[in-house]
Amino acid sequence: MADTTFNLNDMVTATANKWQRSDITLVAIRNYGDKNMHVVIQGKPHTDAQMNGVGELIYRVRDNKILSERSPLSEPTYTATVTGILYHLHFGDYGGRPIKVIYFVLGIMGCIVINSGVMIWLVARDKKSIPERKRKFNFWTANIYLATSLSLLPVTGITMISLLFIDKPGQPDIYHWFFYSWLGLSVYFMALRNLDRVNRHSTFLSTVICFALPILDGVVRGNCFWETYKRGAFDILFIDVLFLSLAIISAIILWKIKTKPQMDATASAPKVKAKSKARELATAE
């Protein structure tokens, strides 16, 4: 058994000091306890210093020798450039919080456009001239898609609320709560077999859950709005304000959905009375 006495924290600190304007992203120990044991440290540059790039340092423990080192600020390879651009475009992390907000709004707009397109597609094919089996297929296609799509927002809120009650949540906990709740809620929406009810139920759940998240965050974790502002925990404050805004928007949409049928009924009432009056006059003549 080889000597395994080394200070990993000192090694990471020294590397971080050497790689200025960069972040350590990975620390791995290869062949632990063996004479060929290595420590691998990887990092990436800050986006304001360099858009793409991957740094890597390979350290051999037995003789305290650095076998290879590549700075994150060195000229990136073609692979690092392509993967870096895709990563930054996907997460919008190259411009800070404003870019994330813009990306989020664009993502919501994209969902609205796609869902509207699915509804237009369904209405255009829901005609008596189309065979019944095809109409059923078209309905279930739209039903499955909208059920899985409209359940995403309440499921995200459910997942984040559940993590508040776990002492040290990890990635498996996120996967467990997100995907199982998504499956359950999607199946429930599909079983409704009514797109109007799916829309109403998802909007109602979004209103309640998105409003409950910042409240529970303050009660369970002590992250009230004013407390997070005092501590300078602006990332937590941003998420709580975001979900409170989503709750308000969902509530307005739900109110609009409920008042629209009443307005339509009120608007159509004079037309019905006018038609009845016309029929009475024609009969009298």
Image (cartoon, rainbow, N blue to C red):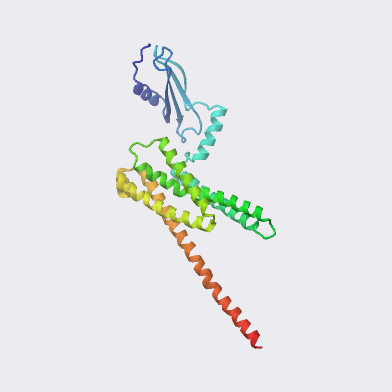
Nearer to us in this view, 88 or 71: 88
Residue found at x 42% / y 47%: 157
Q: How many marks?
A: 0
Q: Does residue 118 show up?
A: yes
**Residue 154 appears at what percent x and percent y?**
44, 49
Whole-percent x, y for residue 280 in the image? 61, 84
Residue drawn at (34%, 20%) of the image: 7
Can residue 249 be seen in this snapshot?
A: no
* Quarter of the rendering occupied by the N terminus: top left
Extreme residue toward the bottom, this view: 285
> Camera-side residue: 228 or 23?
228
- Relative image position of residue 248 (x, y in whole percent): 42, 56
Residue 10 appears at what percent x and percent y? 34, 22
- Quadrant housing residue 83: top right
Q: What residue do we see at 46% from left, 30% from top?
A: 44
Does residue 263 sit above or below 103 in this rendering? below
The quadrant of the rendering that contains the C terminus is bottom right
Which residue occupies the foreground of this view, 78 or 91?
Answer: 91
Q: Quadrant of residue 30?
A: top left
Which residue is drawn at the image coordinates 45% and 42% (left, top)?
178
> In the rendered view, would you say 43 is above or below 221?
above
Q: Is 43 left, or right, of 136 in this rendering? A: left
